Image (cartoon, rainbow, N blue to C red):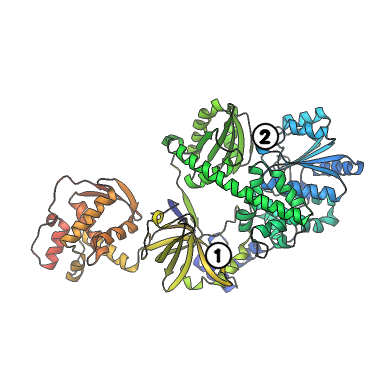
Amino acid sequence: MALKYTRWLYSHGDKHTVEQLMDAGYPYLVSSVLAARGISTVEEANVFLERETRLAYSPFLMKDMDKAVSRINAAIAAGEKIAVFGDYDVDGITATVLLVDYLRSRGADCVKYIPRRVEDGYGLGQEPMRHLREQGVDLLITVDCGITGVEEAEYAKQLGLDLIITDHHECKDVLPDAAAVVDPHRSDCPYPFKQLAGVGVALKLVLALGGESQEDKLFARYCTLAAIGTVADVMQMSDENRTIVQRGLKAIRSSDFLGLHALLKETGLLDKEVTSIQIGFVLAPRINAAGRMGEAELAADLLLTDDPNQAEKLARQLCQLNRERQSVEQEIFAQAIEQIKTIPDNERSALVLSSEEWHQGVVGIVASRLAEKFSCPSFMIHLSDGMGKCSCRSYGGFNLFAALESCSDLLEGFGGHELAAGFTIKEENIPAFRRRINRCASAFLGGEPPVSSLDVDVVLHRPELVTLEEVDALRLLEPYGAGNNRPVFCFQGAKIESMQSVGQNRHLKLRLSRGKYSFDAIYFSANRDSCGLEVGDRVDAAFYLQVNEFRGSRTVQLQMIDLRGSATPSAREQECLELASRLRDCVSLTPQEAARMLPGRDQFVHLWQAVIRLTDGGGPITVEKLPTLRRLAGAMGGAEPFLRTAVGLSVFAERHLLVLDGGTDCLTITVDAHEKVNLGESLYVRRLHQILGLSEKGGV
């Protein structure tokens, strides 16, 4: 049984294309992934893998960019006080740091403001704006927020505060009335690439302010900040985002930002190659933790500081905050799972959960975990004084922003984009929202229940080519992200050579063999008990490929994604299945074949006892066919256990002891026995006896 995903979806890369790419000099693994993702020629591969060093489009193609540049330059020249107002996630924090650092380098009197998640809420707020105006701020520039702040823009006018909005979230029909509104999602914005992160838009603003002559210099300085924010916000990894992240990864260890070096040191990455994977799973969660735990300013201060001692201190604090966040997250996740157990089936197309006990800053990451675990959009609502603040995450292409628009009459406000969003709602409206959003999600799914699916890029048929050099070459496919996911590989019919629980029984270390080649594997958050597999079992294994470095030694390691009893028969198993089929179809059999197929009395008994245990005495139970046959064969014992299990089940079904239903992959078993049955009267048993020249004998 698969531990995590109900369905594995295989890409079908053309074998000829793989060979063509390998003939052109591309490694086996890279060629296989490219073919699986629709690259069909060497020319297309060259274009896909090309590393651009400059951004493709002029920032002035963005609507209102000229207005923003003119107003900011005027403010700098006049000595006006400028505030940069950013969101509290990684995208917003890096965007804030990027713009503040640039404006200060121009001599601007510039302060930053990052709202506190719990006290201030998301986006522009009137109270922070009033506070900034009282401090003497003349010009307020938003990054990664503000596009839905129509009322806030009006309030800014009342305060005499000029406002420039830069954002990358979806726009509503009415835009804020500001000095400039820079967002590639504006319907009237001609900018060719719409998928920039908030920090990407902030980068474009800085490049516009610096002018074409300074573009290379400024891009070199800020590409790393832009890369971190882009990866963390799970933006489409194509076009300019690909260029930003490639340049940023290459420059990260030589970055001018001391705080970033301190964070790399604190996380053990200072002397290692940093990839998009390390950004997504190591750096970004720590920067994000500051915002989630209500201290986003700490992360911004870390990235802006010029003091090495202060940088080391803040990096340690950030990592401590992340550990606290992990503890809170685990507690909320466990509570959410308990809530889900009480939800009726007709309200499971989208999960809508709420509690007054949950930390508002952590519910978003729990929503992500729930969406992945239950294969559906997830909505986590923090309740306080009759109001709810929700963080929601999409799954499987469900457009959150469009869905929230259709529920807008039930909401007090909302914002975000297709994959992640947030809203406020009166507690009394939550039941109606739950019903409506479930109708939306159910319609999106075509009325079918959500099913967890794993996209497998490449089934590896040549294990001898899975070498260190080949795995190292996968860097050519970097950076990974939305639209260019880290490739998933698979071995079919591998054998478990060894299993060992590690990390206080929280993880599983394995050794798998495919033919005469063996590979070490690590399966996080799994152990022998949850795995349900044993040494010697044949399995299908889905995994990422990585290099494990330990005490100066480098070896190929499989980082397991999912593991299940193999759905692919071995040559011997296939022969046995065909023999059993020939018996059922009354195709001629030799005496030698019949002798192999006929179970003994004890084998029938052991098989029946195993079926009773499997079905808990009745069923119905739906199981994966091949792994179940193997497990039942192990219980049957004796000679030819796999073949005789297949025959024995057919005999039980023919004698109406059980009902078998299913296709090639799955089998539904229902025990239907009410009294003892003579198996010797089975047509199949009698036929085998006849071929062997035996007299009919009684059964069980």
> Can the viewer see residue 100?
yes
Q: Position of residue 15 (x, y in %)?
A: 50, 67
The answer to which of 674 and 503 lies nearer the viewer is 503
Write down the quadrant of residue 81 in the picture.
Answer: top right
What amino acid is labelled 2 in the image?
A: Glu
Looking at the image, tell me whether mark 1 or mark 2 is earlier in sequence order. 2
Q: Residue sitting at 46 percent across and 68 percent down?
A: 461
Secondary structure under tag 1 reads strand
Mark 2 surroundings: few (<14), some (14-19) or many (≥20) residues within 10 A: few
Which label is found at residue 546?
A: 1
Quadrant for residue 187, please give it.
Answer: top right
The residue at the point 42 percent across, 50 percent down is 6
* Tag 2 residue: 119
Residue at 83 percent of width and 38 percent of height: 139
The mark tally for this picture is 2
Residue drawn at (80%, 50%) of the image: 101
Above or below, 179 relative to 38: above
In the rendered view, does 372 fall on the left or right side of 200?
left
Residue 518's place in the image compared with 157, above or below, is below
| Residue 5 location (% of width, % of height) | 45, 52
Residue 87 shown left or right of residue 529 in the figure:
right
Is the residue 697 above or below the residue 90 in the image? Answer: below
Q: Is residue 20 visible?
A: no
Measured in 3D between alpha carbons, the distance from the residue under mark 1 to the one under mark 2, in whole angstroms, is 42 Å
User: Residue 225: where, in percent of width, then height?
Assistant: 72, 53
Farthest residue, direction right: 78
